[in-house]
Image (cartoon, helix red, strand yellow):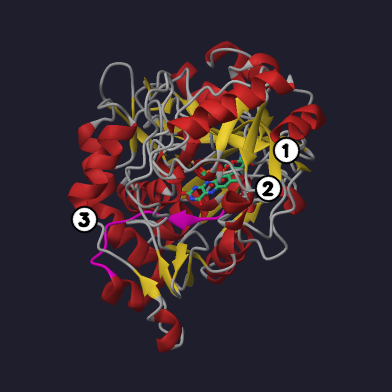
Amino acid sequence: MTDRQTCDVIVIGAGSAAFEAAVAARRAGAERVVMLEKAPEAEAGGNARYSGTGFRFVHGGAAEIREFLPDMPRALFDTMQINPYTAADYHADLERMTQGRIDRALAEVLVSQSNAAVRWMAAAGVKWEPVTEHALVDGKRYFERGVVLHVAGGGPGQLAQWREIATGLGIEIRFDSPVCGIIGDMRAVEGVRVAGRDGSYELRARAVIACSGGFQANREMRARYLPGATDFMKVRGTRHDTGEVTRFLLDLGARPAGQWQSGHMSPIDASAPDFETPQNADGLGNTQSRYDYPQGISVNALGLRFFDEGEAQHSYTYAKTGRAVLAQPGAVAFQIYDAKGVKLFRYPKHAATFEEADTIADLARKIGVEPRVLVDTVEKFNAACPAEPPFDPRRPDGRKTVGLDIPKSNWARPLDTPPFRALPVTGGITFTFGGVEVNGAAQVMNVADQPVRGLYASGDILGLFFHNYPSFTGQTRNAVFSKLAGEHAVRAN
Ligand SMILES: Cc1cc2nc3c(=O)[nH]c(=O)nc-3n(C[C@H](O)[C@H](O)[C@H](O)COP(=O)(O)OP(=O)(O)OC[C@H]3O[C@@H](n4cnc5c(N)ncnc54)[C@H](O)[C@@H]3O)c2cc1C
């Protein structure tokens, strides 16, 4: 056997979960760690290339967040209004979002280790910045609880930092190296088969950590597992997350977990490309996300509202709203704002596709919706908006419509200030919720309810979520389970 054919730990993928697992394994004592990435180098990095890389984790509030932002001028930091985010808050969010279906033991791992995992990243050299999402009121920046930090430079910044750390530790990254098989059975795994450019070869190791993402970029798997017209969906992230490693693991006897008929699907610009929606030039946000719907109303192609735009902050609703849009006629919808709403856009730098007009009827004509229906929808909505309590963009304000079949539960203000703007949106899938089950050591479980020796997993390949998802939990889940996987993989025998 040549040297190219053995190592201590194999990590499948080169996204954020993979880098975190590889670094954890190396720092825990694995001498030779090899990352196998399907994509060529120029396209590598998985969903993190497109991600804002915000992290939701338990913290004690402003004083603790300050430790992650040591170089920020004090006066600027003091404009940030940051409340603590407790373990109880995180558990409540996960329970509510998943409708009580999340595995409680794994939720406990995620929540209780979230702070340590983010600190572990910081100690490894990863730098942080405040997220751009906040409400600016009287010069103060109000952040949502739990949603304060992202990695400096967003997704591209995170990848660059991890790559530098990993290569500094001597971790080998093989690009253009798709894993095309797993060597082992449902009891133990000994390595993988790689479809190398010069032919297939086997790579053997004490442990394999699968960080190959979800199956959202595989049209056939979307059609097979997800409901509705999801094979038409646009994919927000990488084209390389096509689920074959998930299939290899299931064929081996790994136990499926999470909601196979669901995924993280959010509203995006209807003219977004089929794959890989672009980042801002600064890497700090995806230009085609359309998350400002709480500031207006959304209607379908018939001109009718179809969901509660003000149920909660977008971070608690966006991951299911793309699915709601996809279920509408033609899989499109229009977000309708007046000038007051546009003024509150959280991503004003994003160049959106939109139409504008001074009356709702003219706006309807421009977007091809029957004017009488849209005018009627807006008039009924406006009449249902209450006078009290006062509008407050910092938190759910309780301004709920009165008497509508589909309420708007917060931030209900009449659309009465021209110009009116319509943003056409469709549903974009971020990642799938169905995947493999792991235990509290990130070891893959088999269908006989036993851990598979030498096989670990982290990232979107885990089956963890159901129905919905609290924003910024994917990256934290990656850090928590990759750290566990890397550390436990070193002990595998
Ligand atoms: C636009 C966008 C914005 C987001 N914003 C946030 C955010 O702010 N906060 C947050 O928490 N989450 C966010 N997410 C979600 C988050 O980015 C993902 O949950 C996370 O990146 C998944 O990490 P991963 O390592 O599991 O998968 P990926 O990063 O997708 O990596 C999987 C890797 O495996 C490789 N691979 C696949 N198959 C094979 C194979 N056969 N052999 C070898 N390699 C293979 C792929 O090429 C890829 O590099 C966002 C996602 C998108 C798309």
- Say which amino acid is labelled 2: Pro
- Say which amino acid is labelled 3: Thr
* In-front residue for pair 337/94: 337
Give residue 86's mark: 3
| Vertical side of 385 occupied by 186: above or below | above
Badge 3: residue crowd in 10 Å (few <14, some 14–19, many ≥20): some
The reply to whether discs 2 and 1 touch (Cβ–Cβ < 8 Å) is yes
- Label 2: which residue? 418
**How far across and how far down the image is residue 127, in percent?**
48, 72
Residue 146 falls in image quadrant = bottom left
Q: Quadrant of the N terminus?
A: top right
165 on left or right of 231: left
Measured in 3D between alpha carbons, the distance from the residue under mark 3 to the one under mark 2, in whole angstroms, is 42 Å
Q: Secondary structure at mark 1?
A: loop
269 on left or right of 77: right
In magenta stretch: residue 55:
yes
The span shown in magenta is 52-61
**How far across and how far down the image is residue 429, in percent?**
59, 32
Give residue 212's mark: none
Question: Residue 181, can we see it?
Answer: no
* In-front residue for pair 12/282: 282
Q: Main secondary structure of the magenta part?
A: loop
The reply to whether discs 3 and 2 touch (Cβ–Cβ < 8 Å) is no
Badge 1: residue crowd in 10 Å (few <14, some 14–19, many ≥20): some
N-term mark: 3 or 2: 3
215 on left or right of 421: left
438 on left or right of 368: left
- Label 1: which residue? 359
